[in-house]
Amino acid sequence: TDIAWLTTHDPAHALPAGVDAAASGVGRHGAEVSRGLADAWLVVDSGRVAAVGTGSTPPTDQRVSLGGRSVLPGFVDSHTHMVFAGDRSAEFTARMAGQPYAAGGIATTIGATRSAMDEDLRAALAGRVAEARAAGITTLEIKSGYAATPEGESRLLRLAREVTPHTTYLGAHVVPPEHAADPAGYVSLVTGEMLDACAPLSGSVDVFCEEGAFDADQSREVLRAGMAKGLAGRVHANQLGEGPGVRLAVELGCASADHCTYLAGEDVEALAGASTVATLLPATDFSTRQAYPDGRRLVDAGATVALATNCNPGSSYTTSMSFVIALAVRDCHLTLPEAVWSATAGGARSLGVDDVGHLRVGARADMVVLDAPSPDHLAYRPGVPLIAATVVGGDVVAG
Ligand code: NIG
């Protein structure tokens, strides 16, 4: 009987937008996400949400009073590249001095990762996962993509599987230097031997559809091959300029089109009528000093929007979903409740899971406790460590 109370007991502050979104069963973005429950309580039983309410609390075995703090569903980070070796801070410094982001830097990480020992990759990954947990992330997707060989990509996926069930095969990240003269041959490898090695270790297949990486035809081939093996499709789309990525993701019924920084009207229209989630990664646009994606336009058009960190050593080395939410509010023009929804339920949509990203009865008891009277503080107090505790399945895992 591992029942616990989580109470906020502070009717003076209207808050937990997350608890509210959870309790009211919101689908897409809408007015409902903006209501919070004041003086709220939540009962956890066997790692799941057993009841949510306000006012006087029912009797339980244990009780934790949160003293007016906010409770949100745990963050769902649906896009990361966390298994890697090496450091590319010099690239960031060069960008701040005026250099553009070059996806070619991915090859630098491929080199460092290929020569790293399993135990070094595992230790580095464990450090990043602990950082993510402390940042309130309770569900995590991790991609391969920094090996570009059948053995190497499957090694990265095996390591990722040790820490999360949400793994994505990204053999088609860039064409590695040894295949530069024969990109078609590399696509055959990605859709053949490499896919055979990686599909059993993955839930999704991903491709970087961008000039300098893979074009529309190559991307279609990669996605079709992976999806034919039962993997969900994901696309790195429209990150560095307008292009075919978003429309390809929608055409193939992919779970998610990620980045969506440069969108034409037809891309927005395609996403508006699709089940494909538009996953925004504004920490990337911060670190690469690009324009930010227009989240407002997407939400207003009716698209389903997720937010993720894109934790990777090149374009976005952060695990802070709070930072991502602040950017989404400040620069992508989402409201705070919309941003919280996108960082929780939106990410869950992208990963195809329905028992996380909200706190309705039956959900896994994954929560973020904020040391703040309302979730607005996530954007109002940027850079301040407000995550007082992270709870997974009813257990405090950080804080
Ligand atoms: O999502 N754009 C492709 N992949 C990553 C960047 C990886 C890197 O620079 O190492 C991204 O931004």
Image (spheres, rainbow, N blue to C red):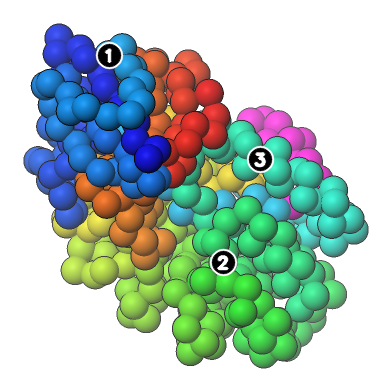
- Give residue 118's position: percent from left, percent from top: 84, 57
- Residue pointed to by mark 2: 168
- Residue pointed to by mark 3: 128
**Where is the N terminus found, in terms of image quarters?**
top left
The three-letter code of the residue at mark 3 reads Arg
Q: CA distance from mark 3 to mark 2?
A: 17 Å
Report the front residue among 353 and 176. Answer: 353
Disc 3 and disc 2 in contact, CB within 8 angstroms = no
Residue projecting furthest to the top: 12
The three-letter code of the residue at mark 2 reads Thr
Q: Which residues are magenta?
A: 84-97
Q: Earlier in the sequence, mark 2 or mark 1?
A: 1
Task: Count neighbours of disc 3 (C-alpha within 10 A) and say few if under 14, some if 14 to 19, many if 20 or more.
Answer: some
Q: CA distance from mark 2 to mark 1?
A: 39 Å
The total of numbered circles placed on residues is: 3
Placement of 335 over or under 364, stated as above or below = above
Q: Disc 1 on helix, strand or loop?
A: loop
Placement of 365 over or under 241, stated as above or below = above
